[in-house]
Amino acid sequence: CRLVPLIALTGYGQLRDKEAAAQAGFNAHLIKPVDIELMIRTIEGVMGPQPLPA
């Protein structure tokens, strides 16, 4: 069974919102409007290292 990383993308940015997302099983929490570079780094972070092409 492979786990799917979850990223919360929300307009709620208080600490309690981030904690609630973590409690609900999200791997990361981003606040709208989101910076695209931050989103890309976050996605790469939750996906983990990817194998190099053969």
Image (cartoon, rainbow, N blue to C red):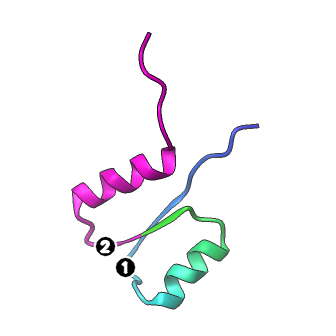
Q: In the displayed structure, would residue 54 be above or below residue 34?
A: above
Q: Are marks 1 and 2 in contact (CB under 8 Å)?
A: yes
* Magenta span contains residue 43: yes
**Residue farthest to the top?**
54
Judging from the image, what secondary structure is the residue with disc 1 in?
Answer: loop
Q: Quadrant of the C terminus?
A: top left
Q: Tag 2: residue type?
A: Lys
The residue beneath circle 1 is 11
Please check the rendered image and state whether residue 25 is part of the magenta-colored stretch, yes or no.
Answer: no
* Secondary structure beneath label 2: loop
9 over 14 or under it: above or below: above
Q: Residue at the spot x=37%, y=79% of the render?
A: 11
Per the model, the C-alpha gap separating discs 1 and 2 is: 5 Å
Task: Determine which quarter of the picture holds residue 42.
Answer: bottom left
Residue at 55 percent of width and 61 percent of height:
27
User: Compared with residue 42, is residue 30 higher up or lower down, i.e. above or below?
Assistant: below
Q: Nearer the viewer, residue 38 or 31?
A: 38
Query: Disc 1 marks which amino acid?
Result: Gly
Q: Position of residue 9 (x, y in %)?
A: 42, 67
The location of residue 21, given as percent across then percent down, is 57, 74
Q: Is residue 37 left or right of residue 49?
A: left
Q: Position of residue 34 (x, y in %)?
A: 27, 67
Residue located 53% across and 90% down the image: 16
Q: Say few, some or many: other residues with alpha carbon within 10 Å of mark 1 (under 14 / 14 to 19 / 20 or more).
A: few
Say which of 23 and 32 sits in front.
Answer: 23
The furthest residue to the right: 1
Q: Is residue 25 left or right of residue 27?
A: right
Question: Which badge, 1 or 2, comes first in the chain's sequence?
Answer: 1
Mark 2 Cα-neighbour bin, 10 Å: few <14, some 14–19, many ≥20: few
Q: Dot 2 corresponds to which residue?
A: 32
Magenta residues span 30-54
